[in-house]
Image: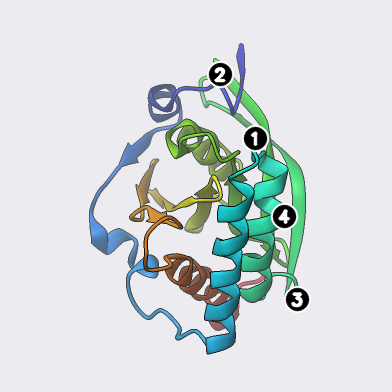
């Protein structure tokens, strides 16, 4: 058996070994596009403060992964309600997936996992500010595949380096999985796109509550 880490596995290898297929069909992932909740002025002000803090800290590199989580990710998760019941947070959760042919095992540690009881709500991979999000796409998908219920439910992920944000959705489709991405949101634009990121997070938080999911 070949063993790899989630940080080093290639997207092409994941697609081949775990029957992943990319789709750019917008209808597959409406959660980042429609029925987004309105933000209060207080929430918008806090998003502006996050942007100001992050921009200031960029003057003193390197802006490492833990700092990104502390300054940017943590307040967004707080405003989305993920630090309160009925949710709970796991950090550095170990993951492992093995291909059906037994030829490839991929292991890793997931930065942040949001749970509703035992149901996975959101998996988050955070990178340091200097990294492109491209380096984390295969990594995050390998984490989503390790969800024990991956064959029964849609799974959502978030990839960020503090200034850029991309959401991913993975869904079972017969004997394979389909994945797709949202647009990329950037903190560097004049219009603070953290507003949209927070709206999507709040939209995802509402899914298990409204559907009555149980672990």
Of pointers 3 and 4, the one earlier in the residue sequence: 4
Q: Position of residue 95 (x, y in %)?
A: 68, 37
Tell me if 16 is positioned left or right of 46 in this view: left
Q: CA distance from mark 2 to mark 1?
A: 34 Å
Q: Residues within 10 Å of mark 1 (few under 14, many from 20)?
A: few
Q: Earlier in the sequence, mark 2 or mark 4?
A: 4
Spatial CA span between label 3 and label 4 = 18 Å
Label 1 sits on residue? 62
What is the secondary structure assignment of the residue under circle 1? loop
The residue closer to the viewer here, 213 or 26, is 26
Secondary structure of the residue carrying tag 2 is strand
How is the structure coloured here?
rainbow
Residue 205 vertical position relative to residue 148 in the rendered view, above or below: below
| Distance from the alpha carbon under mark 2 to that under mark 4 | 34 Å
Q: Residue at x 50, y 40 (%)?
A: 141
Q: Quadrant of the N terminus?
A: top right
Q: Which residue is mark 4?
A: 70
| Mark sitting earlier along the chain (1/3) | 1
């Amino acid at each position: 058996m070949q063993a790899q880490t989630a940080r080093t596995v290639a997207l092409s290898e994941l697609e081949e070994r775990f029957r992943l297929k990319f789709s750019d069909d917008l209808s597959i992932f409406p959660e980042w596009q429609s029925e987004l909740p309105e933000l209060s002025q207080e929430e918008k002000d806090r998003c502006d403060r996050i942007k100001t803090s992050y921009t200031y800290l960029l003057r003193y590199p390197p802006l490492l992964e833990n700092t990104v989580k502390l300054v940017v990710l943590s307040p967004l998760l707080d405003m989305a309600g993920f630090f309160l019941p009925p949710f709970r947070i796991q950090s550095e959760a170990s993951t492992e997936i093995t291909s059906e042919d037994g030829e490839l095992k991929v292991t890793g540690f997931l930065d942040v996992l949001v749970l509703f009881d035992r149901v996975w709500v959101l998996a988050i991979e955070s990178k340091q500010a200097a990294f492109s999000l491209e380096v984390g796409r295969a990594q995050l998908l390998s984490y989503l595949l390790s969800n024990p219920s991956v064959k029964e439910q849609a799974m959502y992920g978030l990839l960020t380096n503090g200034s850029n944000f991309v959401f991913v959705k993975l869904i079972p489709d017969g004997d394979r999985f389909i994945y797709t991405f949202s647009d990329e949101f950037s903190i560097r634009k004049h219009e603070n796109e953290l507003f949209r990121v927070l709206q999507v997070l709040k939209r995802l938080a509402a899914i298990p509550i409204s559907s009555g999911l149980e672990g």
